[in-house]
Image (spheres, helix red, strand yellow):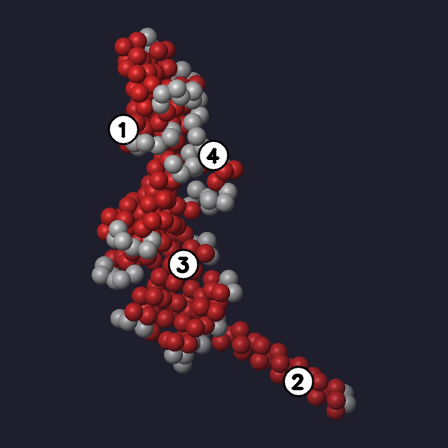
Amino acid sequence: MNFYARLSAAALAAALAAALAGCASKSGNNMENWSPGRIHSEAKEEMSAGSYDKAIPMLETLEGRAAGTPLAQQAQLEKAYAQFKNGDKAEAVGTLDRFIRLHPASPALDYALYMKGVIHFNDDMGLFASIARQDLSERDQKAAKEAYESFSELVTRFPDSRYAPDARARMRYTVNALAQYEVHVARYYYRRAAYVAAINRAQQALKDYRDAPALEEALHILADSYDKLGMTDLRDDARRVLELNYPGGSVKTKSKPWWQIW
């Protein structure tokens, strides 16, 4: 091998070693000498690039390195966000629960509650951009109920929070989903001639979710179920309530899409 070939090979080896060293420097194993500021900067850089899996261990290191400071709290919240974006929803909720428990007086507590609600809100509920293509009222509503609880705590404790208006909108969205879920089940029972079960689910929707659009159909199911059972007095009562609340209404099966915010 001549001189120039050896030089080129040496240069290539040096470049490869430098590249590997650069990768290793962000692997989470060589941060002992990094300042908290540098760790935070590198983590944010990884998050900006969409490399949430690389940012998470950096933020965990930062939590310990900056313990007892506002930066540690910020790192914990950013870790929850990175976990959520990385698809680790259970871990993100766990991180937020820990933050809420350890920092009850934090000025970022409203954000933690909001973020927790958003994670549950998006869990099997879809984004606003795709809700029109899905009938999510037919799915289990555990996530919807947990989202509502988080948003409700936020607007109750922090009514003037910058996140409160969006939380209220999402609460209305969620209540509509939960009401439509009850109506979906009531409709299922009615179509199978299980009229007592249909009545119970329609009554549950009417009891728990006031003013939701799905309640018009709940009243129809209630009146029609009473009619099938020959309970004419209760049928007539349900029809009077229906006419009083929805005069001239024509809904007899499925009401407005559950995802529409009213």
Inter-mark Cα distance, 1 to 3: 36 Å
Inter-mark Cα distance, 4 to 1: 23 Å
What residue did someone put label 4 on? 135
- Amino acid on which disc 1 is placed: Lys
Name the residue furthest right: 2
Residue drawn at point x = 46 percent, y = 57 percent: 86
In the rendered structure, which disc, 4 or 2, sits on the residue that comes first in sequence?
A: 2
Query: Relative to 160, is 254 on the left or the right?
Result: right
Res. 259 mark: none
- Compared to 203, does 235 lie above or below? above
What residue did someone put label 3 on? 81
Between disc 4 and disc 2, the foreground one is 4
In the rendered structure, which disc, 2 or 1, sits on the residue that comes first in sequence?
A: 2
Say which of 248 and 214 sits in front. 248
Res. 28 visible in picture: no
What residue did someone put label 1 on? 207
Rendered location of residue 5, percent (x, y):
74, 86
